[in-house]
């Protein structure tokens, strides 16, 4: 994934930067996060339980 | 001072400087021109939307964009600040308000809700934050690059278009300096980063964890001041965004999106908060005892009640939290991370 920057000067002298990206890589990735949809039980074991959620 | 800047073309004397508070040992920024900033304009006159053909000129002279960063039109700090409008003294030092204030537009959509944005949007945002941290941090008059987001009128938002801000300060702001002093002292006494220790303590206990992935852990800390105050800590000792590789960038994006989805789904409305990124100062100090983390301060303590900073908080700096972090973390763990509109 590559990030591109294009900076312009506004009429009043302030800068503005357009950021754009090559998107191809993003679509193929998923990401699981523990704690996404769990039982909500407390205690040490809770953070390693549950299937997580794709976000 | 840039004379072309509209801030200085209003025919009104503008005052902007840093004034030292010797009692609290902190700089106060005066910026009288900010009284004139755009205040809750109607949607059709949003200055942060892309300019449309035939429409009024907005801040962004393009019909579409992905993420945009620009200098704030009403900056608290400026690269070329005016001379202080008042003479300082030995007791009351005064400095020019030098620094940089930027606005980060997350999306061209005026009503774009971040919890409904794709994960890729968050990943892009993390990359932009990293770029700004590096670029602004390279300037010799900048000591700290502070990235934050105010979300919702409840925390003072005056423009509803989704955006965050960056303040590049010529000093380390007081709360961050206090945190870093504590971490440095802990390192000297115990030989470890204080944040690493806090994270270890939270993971060992487990009750206050909200979510985690390979690179980050989200937790309502033991010492939370707000009911739904969540901190996201880097699992490794990464002082700043600079140390992040693609995996950390992706994992930070994932846990941010997850948390915001949970927040928005907690009570079924877009959950206001102040989001603050704390990391290593850019003055070269603190590599061993700075630890990248994000703090969220949501003002709601229940679905219809706000937490106000009143006598004890505002006047004495002593927070009273009317809830238990353990219970609130459980609530957030149980909250399904889907866009709330899908539950209707």
Image (spheres, rainbow, N blue to C red):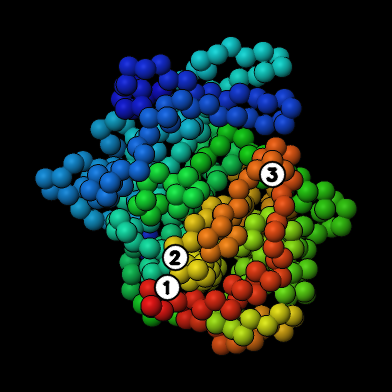
Mark 3 or mark 1: which comes first in sequence?
Answer: 3
B288 w.r.t. B257: above or below: above
Residue A55 place in picture, x, y as percent: 46, 77
Mark 2 or mark 1: which comes first in sequence?
Answer: 2
| Residue at which label 2 appears | B269
Residue B111 occupies which quadrant of the picture?
A: bottom left
B205 w.r.t. B303: above or below: below
Label 1 sits on a secondary structure element that is helix
Q: What residue is shown at x 62% (from left), y 35% (from top)?
A: B171
Kindly check if marks 2 and 1 are in contact, taking CB atoms under 8 A apart as contact. Answer: yes
B138 w.r.t. B341: above or below: above
Residue A46 place in picture, x, y as percent: 68, 82
Alpha carbon of mark 2 to alpha carbon of mark 1: how far?
Answer: 7 Å
> Which chain does tag 2 point to?
B
Label 3 sits on a secondary structure element that is helix
Mark 2 or mark 3: which comes first in sequence?
Answer: 2
Label 2 sits on a secondary structure element that is loop
* Residue A15 in view: yes
Alpha carbon of mark 2 to alpha carbon of mark 3: how far?
Answer: 27 Å
Kindly check if marks 2 and 3 are in contact, taking CB atoms under 8 A apart as contact. Answer: no
Q: What residue is shown at x 49% (from left), y 32% (from top)?
A: B77
Q: What residue is shown at x 74% (from left), y 39% (from top)?
A: B316
Residue A8 place in picture, x, y as percent: 29, 42
Q: What residue is shown at x 61% (from left), y 23% (from top)?
A: B19
**Mark drawn on residue B189:** none
| Residue at which label 1 appears | B340
Depth order, front residue of A4/A45: A45
Residue B293 occupies which quadrant of the picture?
A: bottom right
> Which chain does tag 3 point to?
B
| Residue at which label 3 appears | B313
Q: Is B300 placed left or right of B110 in the picture?
A: right
Depth order, front residue of A20/B200: B200
């Amino acid at each position: 994934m590559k990030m591109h920057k294009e900076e312009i000067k506004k009429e009043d002298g302030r800068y503005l930067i357009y950021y754009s990206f090559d998107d191809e890589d993003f679509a193929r990735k998923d990401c699981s996060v523990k704690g996404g949809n769990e039982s909500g039980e407390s205690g040490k074991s809770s953070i390693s339980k549950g299937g997580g959620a794709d976000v | 001072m840039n004379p072309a800047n509209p801030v200085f073309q209003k025919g009104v004397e503008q005052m902007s400087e840093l004034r030292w508070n010797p009692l609290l040992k902190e700089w106060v920024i005066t910026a009288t021109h900010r009284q004139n900033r755009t205040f809750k304009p109607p949607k059709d006159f949003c200055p942060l939307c892309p300019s449309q053909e035939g429409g009024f000129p907005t801040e962004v002279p393009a019909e579409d964009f992905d993420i945009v960063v620009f200098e704030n039109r009403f900056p608290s700090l400026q690269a070329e600040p005016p001379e202080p409008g008042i003479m300082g003294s030995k007791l009351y030092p005064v400095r020019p308000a030098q620094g940089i204030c930027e606005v980060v537009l997350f999306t061209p959509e005026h009503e774009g809700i971040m919890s409904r944005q794709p994960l890729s949007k968050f990943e892009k945002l993390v990359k932009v934050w990293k770029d700004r941290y590096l670029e602004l941090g390279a300037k010799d008059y900048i000591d700290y690059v502070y990235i934050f987001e105010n979300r919702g009128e409840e925390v003072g938002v005056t423009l509803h278009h989704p955006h965050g801000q960056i303040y590049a300060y010529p000093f380390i702001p007081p709360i961050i300096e206090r945190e870093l002093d504590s971490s440095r002292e802990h390192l000297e006494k115990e030989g470890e980063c204080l944040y690493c220790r806090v994270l270890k303590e939270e993971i060992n206990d487990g009750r206050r964890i909200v979510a985690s992935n390979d690179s980050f852990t989200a937790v309502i800390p033991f010492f939370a001041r707000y009911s739904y105050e969540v901190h996201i800590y880097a699992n490794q000792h990464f002082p700043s965004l600079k140390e992040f590789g693609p995996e950390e960038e992706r994992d930070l994006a994932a846990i941010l999106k997850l948390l915001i989805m949970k927040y928005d789904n907690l009570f079924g409305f877009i959950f206001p908060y102040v989001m603050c990124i704390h990391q290593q100062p850019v003055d070269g100090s603190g590599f061993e005892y700075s630890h990248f983390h994000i703090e969220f301060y949501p003002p709601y303590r229940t679905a219809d009640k706000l937490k106000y900073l009143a006598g004890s908080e505002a006047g004495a700096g002593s927070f009273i939290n009317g809830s238990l972090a353990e219970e609130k973390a459980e609530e957030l763990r149980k909250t399904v991370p889907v866009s709330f509109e899908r539950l209707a």
